[in-house]
Amino acid sequence: MQRLCALAGLARATYYRHLSRRSRAEAECELRDQIQRICLKHPFYGYRRVTAALRRLGMVVNAKKVLRFMRQDNLLAQRKTPFLKPPTERPTGVIVIPNLIRGLAPSAPDQIWVADITYVHLAKTFAYLAVILDGFSRKAVGWAFDDTLDASLAIAALDKALQSRNPKPGSLIHHSDRGVQYSSIAYRERLAKRDIKISMSSPGNPFDNAKAESFMKTLKAEEINGKSFADVNDARRRINSFIAEIYNKERLHSALGYRSPLEFEAAFKQNTMR
């Protein structure tokens, strides 16, 4: 190498500095490429989730560098807020059901389920999504989408959750707000039949159902806001795909150690079998 440098009229130190700069440039190019690939697949990932995804690929990266590259490449997620509020149904009677999950932290799946309903703005009307999440893994275990806001929507989501999970009688708490769908006789009878305890948030306190609220914000930010849906069937198909294929299987949650809900449940199951 000394002879080659001499023939080229270069000092060895100059050659090695050039080699080092080239190696750094190649590494940064590869890092930017991976960041862009992740952001293309998950356009609403912030720099922390992108950093976690890079580390899962085996890359040793600094979150501040990821943030800098994403800012330079205009890849930071843009959040939008809905501009229109739909009609809502209000309970006509007072049903006193306490909050049973305040202060509780589930230690396994199917100990606490949290339920909520949100709206989706279509071209000329509104449709509604009812969803049930597992409070331990945040996995969406049941959901239903339709243009009706009556109790049948919430019941359809509950039936899907019961079919997919089959919780042990007496072991599960179902938590929701005090909406008429969850307060309905038909819904409460469905829960009672499976010996599922009923819990409801305090009036006007969304923090009592924070995990469900967080899911709805994620869904709207990453799949609904800024997009148009042809009709109810189109919206149902795309939302079903997002929940089943992206949210449950791929989306990384900081509260789960930057794992997806499915990965978190699989890791829990593996640990309990040891």
Image (cartoon, rainbow, N blue to C red):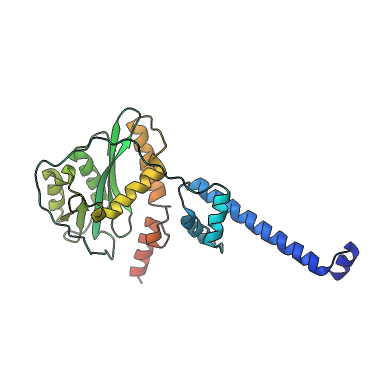
Q: Residue furthest bottom?
A: 274
Residue 162 visible in the picture: yes
Give the residue at x 10% y 52%. Answer: 96
Q: Position of residue 20 (x, y in %)?
A: 72, 64
Q: Residue furthest top?
A: 124
Q: Is residue 176 above or below residue 272?
A: above
Give the residue at x 47% y 52%. Answer: 46
Q: Name the foreground residue: 64 vs 162.
A: 64
Q: Position of residue 49 (x, y in %)?
A: 46, 56
Q: Is residue 232 above or below residue 197?
A: above
Q: Name the foreground residue: 186 vs 1.
A: 1
Q: Is residue 112 above or below residue 186?
A: below
Q: Position of residue 246 (x, y in %)?
A: 41, 48
Q: Name the foreground residue: 131 vs 168.
A: 131
Q: Quadrant of the N terminus?
A: bottom right
Q: Residue furthest right?
A: 7
Q: Name the foreground residue: 52 vs 246.
A: 52
Could you say which quadrant of the image residue 223 lies in?
A: top left
Q: Position of residue 163 (x, y in %)?
A: 25, 49
Q: Is residue 85 above or below residue 157?
A: above
Give the residue at x 84% y 67%. Answer: 11
Residue 35 visible in the picture: no
Left or right, residue 226 beside residue 202: right
Number of marks in the rendered image: 0
Q: Quadrant of the C terminus?
A: bottom left
Give the residue at x 17% y 55%. Answer: 199
